[in-house]
Every structure is written in C-alpha cells, then in structure tokens.
C-alpha cells in the first residue's frame, strides 16, 4: 500500500447498505450497474473450496460469477486467471475500471468493472451491496474485523492473511488465494511460476545486482521506506538485491515506516528507488536535506527517481503477475545504470 491512512471502522451506514442489498436480492434481480459477470467456468468438481485468512475461514461453494475486489491490487490476479470483477477498488492512476494498462490485454473487450473508492473510511458497503457480489476479495487490504463481518453479510469474503502485515501479502500468496477461490489453483500455480521466471531471468541477465543493497522509499511525512513485508521490496530482492541491514527493525510489523533523521543512513544503498509525486521538485527538496544530500548514494548518482502517478510508477506499486513483467522491463535498466559505479551515468525514466 502507499500512503493510505488508517481506516476507521464502519458506521451505521452499513445497516442501510444491507437493507439495500436485501431489497435487491428479493426484487427482480436487475441491477443498475452496467458491469456484467464474465469469464470461463472453473473445472468441474472444483468447488466447494475453503480458504484461511485473518478472520477465520471462508467457504466458496460455487464458481463465483460476480466478484468484487476490495484489495487494492486483487483485480489483477482475477483478470490473469480469466475472470473479470464486477467491482474494483481504485488505488493508483484513475484508470478506467481500475484496470491498469498492463492489465488491458487480460480485460480484452469485456465490460469494465464498476469502480469503488476508499477515502480512508473503509469499503463502500452500499455500493458493493448494489453490485450483488457472490465473492468479495480483500487480500491486499487492511480490512478490519468489523468491516469483514459487515461485508460477510453480503457475500463470502476472503480477507488478508493472518500472518504478516496488512497490505503485506506477497503477490505469490495473493495469486494462489485468488486461484483457489476461483477453483483454478493449477492455473494460479503456473502463473506464479511463469512470473517468477520473468524475474529470475532478469536477475540472471544482471549479475551485477547480486549482493548489492537497494531500498524503495517515498517522501511522505518525511522519509518513508518500504520494508521486507512489502511487495516493492520483494521485487528488489527477487532481482538479487539485499535490503539494508536494520531495515526490518525500523519497519517492525508494518509494510513500511517513516524513518528518523538518525536513520537516514538506511537510504545510503547501492541503489535507492524513490516514488515521487513530482520528480524534479521532490528531488531538489530531497537533495537540500542536510543529511540525505550528503549521502554517497546521492553524490555518486545511485538514485532511481520514479514519477509515482505515471503508468510505470503505478505498476511498481501493484506488483502482480500482470504488472511485474511491465515493471521489470522498465525498472531493471534504471537499476543497472544506478549501480554501474559511474556517477556520470544518468538514470533515465522510461517513456511510459
């Protein structure tokens, strides 16, 4: 996740949402949303399936046809496995249907999902209920127990894992869980293997990454670093990099954390990748910092500056089987330029 405020618990609006759902369920069955279920059927005998998660277990009895994704990147795994959600939760980019450009091919000519918004108060319960879902996925999320209970009155909910940080599920586990929920575990396993190979091939082509240190950060309320439980960091380690020593202690149980001035040294790595709202303006501000500006990583040109709102910047945060090839093919040349030991080498952002 990136810069998401802590979500508050649901309020009484949930009750009215459930009444709305009840009315829809008992009515004609028509919905005012234009999204329609689509996708191939699961293999015969694939259901029921039971999935473990942070709040217990959830059984999916039948092949889901109307999937809503509350997890901020869950839609990619659904699309990659041949289904199209009827509702998705917007995160980055304001993409139509919350479908990033890296996922357009998987969407094809199917109807785009209805987009849900989360302004920090939790899932839009009324809107989710109006979509009449038969499965709600909240894997890459920070769903609270109250939110889980409320959404479970609408449809079966698969929440984030019990172990690890909220918004910390690995892309492999996310894909595996979605595959199980859709009755497509074999396809999910193959998809994970194919994607891991793409990363491994890139790492093999760049042996200079092995053993070097790297970290990903963003200037949010100071300097915010992503820790070992974040998929952006997992991308770096997958390419052969090591995270700076002590990062895990600073981040603790979360996927990331702000660092104190005294720990600015964590950014003095062989490559430091910044996600920036305005690269030119933010770089100038970072370099003016009396501690950060003096680091060797700055003086020796080891920074990778990425515009967070670009397609590339959005893909870096998604980290899914659909976005990873898009990201790797663009990020690897930047990292290679950063670690080449030549301060004069410019680290150039991709055109898209």
Image (cartoon, rainbow, N blue to C red):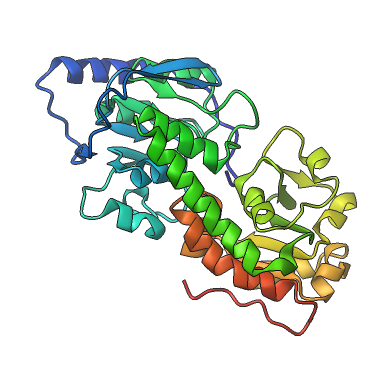
Look at the picture and state if 306 lies above or below 229: below
x, y percentage for residue 274? 67, 61
Reply above or below: 173 against 51: below
| Front-lying residue, 348 or 336 | 336
Question: Which residue sits at x=31%, y=31%?
Answer: 127
Q: Residue at x 72, y 32 (%)?
A: 253
State left or right for residue 165 relative to residue 315: right
- Residue 314 visible to an observer of this rendering: no
Residue placed furthest toward the bottom: 344
What is the quadrant of the N terminus in the image?
Answer: top right
Residue 61 seen in this snapshot: yes
Residue at 85%, 49% (x, y): give it: 245
Q: Is residue 319 above or below residue 335?
A: above
* 310 to the left or right of 96: right
Percent from the top left, x then y, of residue 260?
84, 47
- The answer to whether residue 127 is left or right of residue 24 is right
Residue 275 lies in quadrant? bottom right
228 is higher (above) or lower (below) than 271: above
**Which residue is at the far right?**
262
Rendered residue at 36%/34% (across/down)? 184
The x, y position of residue 114, in whole percent, is 28, 42
| Count of numbered labels shown in the rendering | 0
Residue 144 on image: x %, y %:
54, 23
């Amino acid at each position: 996740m990136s810069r998401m405020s802590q979500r508050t618990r649901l309020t009484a609006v949930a009750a009215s949402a459930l009444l709305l759902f009840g009315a829809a369920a008992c009515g004609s069955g028509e919905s005012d949303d234009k999204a329609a279920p689509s996708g191939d059927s699961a293999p015969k005998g694939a259901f029921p399936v039971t999935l473990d998660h942070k709040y217990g277990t959830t059984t999916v009895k039948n092949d889901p046809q109307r999937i809503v994704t509350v997890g901020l990147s869950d839609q990619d795994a659904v699309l990659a496995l041949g289904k199209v959600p009827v509702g998705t939760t917007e995160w980055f980019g304001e993409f139509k249907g919350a479908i990033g450009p890296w996922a357009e091919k998987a969407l094809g000519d199917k109807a785009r999902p209805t987009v849900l918004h989360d302004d920090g108060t939790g899932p839009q319960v009324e809107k989710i209920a109006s979509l009449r879902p038969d499965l709600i996925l909240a894997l890459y999320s920070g769903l609270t127990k109250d939110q889980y209970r409320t959404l479970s009155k609408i449809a079966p909910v698969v929440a984030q894992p019990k172990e690890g940080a909220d918004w910390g599920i690995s892309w492999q586990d996310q894909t595996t869980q979605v595959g199980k929920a859709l009755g497509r575990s074999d396809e999910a396993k193959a998809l994970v293997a194919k994607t891991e190979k793409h990363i491994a091939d890139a790492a093999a082509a760049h042996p200079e990454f092995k053993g070097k240190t790297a970290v990903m950060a963003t200037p949010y309320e100071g300097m915010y670093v992503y820790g070992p439980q974040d998929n952006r960091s997992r991308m770096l380690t997958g390419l052969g990099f090591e995270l700076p020593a002590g990062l895990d202690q600073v981040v603790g149980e979360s996927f990331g954390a702000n660092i104190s001035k005294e720990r600015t040294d964590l950014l003095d790595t062989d490559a430091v990748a910044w996600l920036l709202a305005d690269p030119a303006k933010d770089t100038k501000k970072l370099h003016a910092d009396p501690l950060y500006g003096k680091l060797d990583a700055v003086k020796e040109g080891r920074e990778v500056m990425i515009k967070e709102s670009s397609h590339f910047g959005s893909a870096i945060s998604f980290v899914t089987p659909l976005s990873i090839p898009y990201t790797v093919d663009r990020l690897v040349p930047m990292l290679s330029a950063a670690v080449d030991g030549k301060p004069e080498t410019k680290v150039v952002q991709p055109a898209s």
